[in-house]
Amino acid sequence: MDAPQIYVERTLAIVKPDAIHKSEEIEDIILRSGFAILQKRRVHLTPEQASDFYAEHYGKMFFPSLVAYMSSGPVLAIVIARDQAISYWRELIGPTNALKARQTHPDCLRAVYGTDDQRNALHGSDSFSSSEKEIRFFFPDSVIEPVPVGQAAKD
Ligand code: RTP
Ligand code: MG
């Protein structure tokens, strides 16, 4: 009989500067939501690093204030994993605008920990390719060794 297949996906969560004082509480919620925490790192981004991280938004009206916000204090970058991690984490954090989220999704994490359309407490990668790119941004040395097929059953 074939060994059961377990599909685990990883994504990047960031506790942004406005919610860093709640990071322990947020880590508890992450674990209780069925994620494993693979790596974490507290870092105070420079404006240049924040610009690089959000480069896709370069040129938009909100870009300068986004960069100022994301470099205003430390953030906690966390690599989290579970099945369908990318979409599930985005669902848990909720819509971008925390103020509107309070009306439409009152239980989502941005409604609870965020304030408005910018200070929204949490980040989540929006696709497989951005999750891989964003994980490399914060954890450039991280290597995930694939387990050869059959190996896990023998160990
Ligand atoms: P994130 O990348 O941080 O997970 O947020 P998101 O996908 O929900 O939203 P995105 O469009 O990627 O925007 C990135 C971050 O920019 C700030 N923002 N400000 N003032 C505004 O209109 C505005 N729009 C977006 C937010 O901090 C948002 O999370
Ligand atoms: Mg985004």
Image (cartoon, helix red, strand yellow):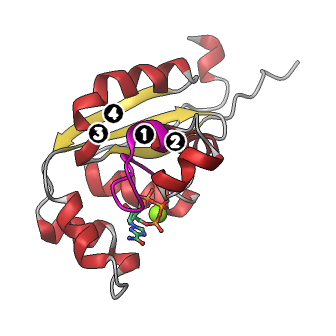
Query: Mark 1 or mark 2, which is nearer the start of the sequence?
Result: 2
Q: Which amino acid, mark 4?
A: Gln
What residue is disc 4 on? 39
**Does residue 34 lie above or below 93 as drawn?**
above
Name the one closer to the observer, 24 or 86: 24
Distance of label 1 from label 4 (alpha carbons): 11 Å
Q: Secondary structure at mark 3?
A: helix
Single out the mark in the foreground, 3 or 4. 3
Query: Mark 2 or mark 3, which is nearer the start of the sequence?
Result: 2
Distance of label 3 from label 4 (alpha carbons): 19 Å
What residue is disc 1 on? 144
Query: Mark 4 or mark 3, which is nearer the start of the sequence?
Result: 3
Q: State the image coordinates of residue 129 (x, y, percent, origin top left).
A: 53, 63
Q: Who's the residue at 54% across and 55% down the image?
A: 100
Q: Secondary structure at mark 1?
A: loop
Q: Residue 38: which quarter of the image?
A: top left
Single out the mark in the foreground, 1 or 4. 4
Circles 1 and 4: CB atoms closer than 8 Å: no
Q: Which residues are magenta?
A: 111-125
What residue is disc 3 on? 19
Task: Tell me the quarter of the image containing the N terminus.
Answer: top right
| Residue 90 in view of the camera | no
Residue 10 — which label? 2
